[in-house]
Image (spheres, grey):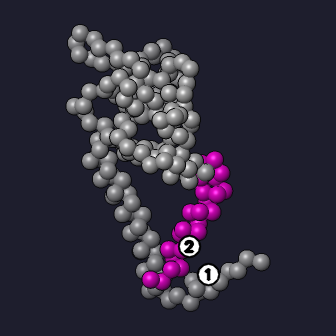
Amino acid sequence: MLSLDFLDDVRRMNKRQLYYQVLNFGMIVSSALMIWKGLMVITGSESPIVVVLSGSMEPAFHRGDLLFLTNRVDDPIRVGEIVVFRIEGREIPIVHRVLKIHEKQNGHIKFLTKGDNNAVDDRGLYKQGQHWLEKKDVVGRARGFVPYIGIVTILMNDYPKFKYAVLFLLGLFVLVHRE
């Protein structure tokens, strides 16, 4: 049967050790948030790191690849560039390649995207009546990637019980670990 020796470790801790462990856990969480906010400022992207959730960009990117994004305002969008964009009414951003650019005489740029593994462009994904994306829709542009490392994120989203178990075990480890 499952051994609950860790509960004995928690019981043996005095209040000072327990407070120290809780504070340690808080420091880890706040450090992660500060790093994330720092990356947002440096990259200019609201989401500087994203995970590819579908196979629509294969063979360039596979499901589970971790993408590093930038979103510099002064950098123009080009045909062939891989962008991550958000569509109004959809929570999850989409990773696709810029297929066409439409530039008006006033300098305003609109563009059309398509997944490398998709047969048609993304007009069917855009909100009703929208035929082109604008700069405001872009979350970032892919600048690099690490293959398959984001598969853990996909597993946690697909299996919520797995996510809670991993988070519980990590939290428990931080609280019980004495060094």
Q: Residue furthest top?
A: 105
**Taking the image as drawn, is residue 3 in sight?**
yes
Q: Image check: 68 left or right of 93?
A: left
Q: Is residue 74 above or below residue 152?
A: above
Instruction: Name the image quarter holding residue 142.
Output: top left
Q: Position of residue 10 (x, y in %)?
A: 57, 83
Which badge, 1 or 2, is on the more N-terminal residue? 1
Give me the residue at 52% from left, 34% from top.
59
The one nearer the camera, 149 or 53, is 149
Cα separation between marks 1 and 2: 8 Å
Give me the residue at 44% from left, 83% from top.
179
User: For numbered disc 2, what is the local secondary structure?
Assistant: helix
The one nearer the camera, 50 or 20, is 50
Q: Main secondary structure of the magenta part?
A: helix
Which residue position is annotated with label 1? 6
Q: Position of residue 58 (x, y in %)?
A: 53, 34
Q: Image check: 20 left or right of 10?
A: left
Q: Residue furthest front?
A: 59
Which residue position is annotated with label 2? 172
In this picture, which residue range is highlighted in magenta?
156-179
Alpha-carbon neighbours of circle 1 within 10 Å: few (<14), some, or many (≥20)?
some
Give me the residue at 29% from left, 44% from top.
43
**177 inside magenta stretch:** yes
Q: Position of residue 167 (x, y in %)?
A: 56, 63
User: For numbered disc 1, what is the local secondary structure?
Assistant: helix
Amino acid at pointer 2: Leu
Amino acid at pointer 1: Phe
Q: Position of residue 69 (x, y in %)?
A: 36, 41
Give me the residue at 30% from left, 53% from top.
38
Q: Are marks 1 and 2 in contact (CB under 8 Å)?
A: yes
Q: Image check: 130 left or right of 81?
A: right
Q: Residue furthest right?
A: 1
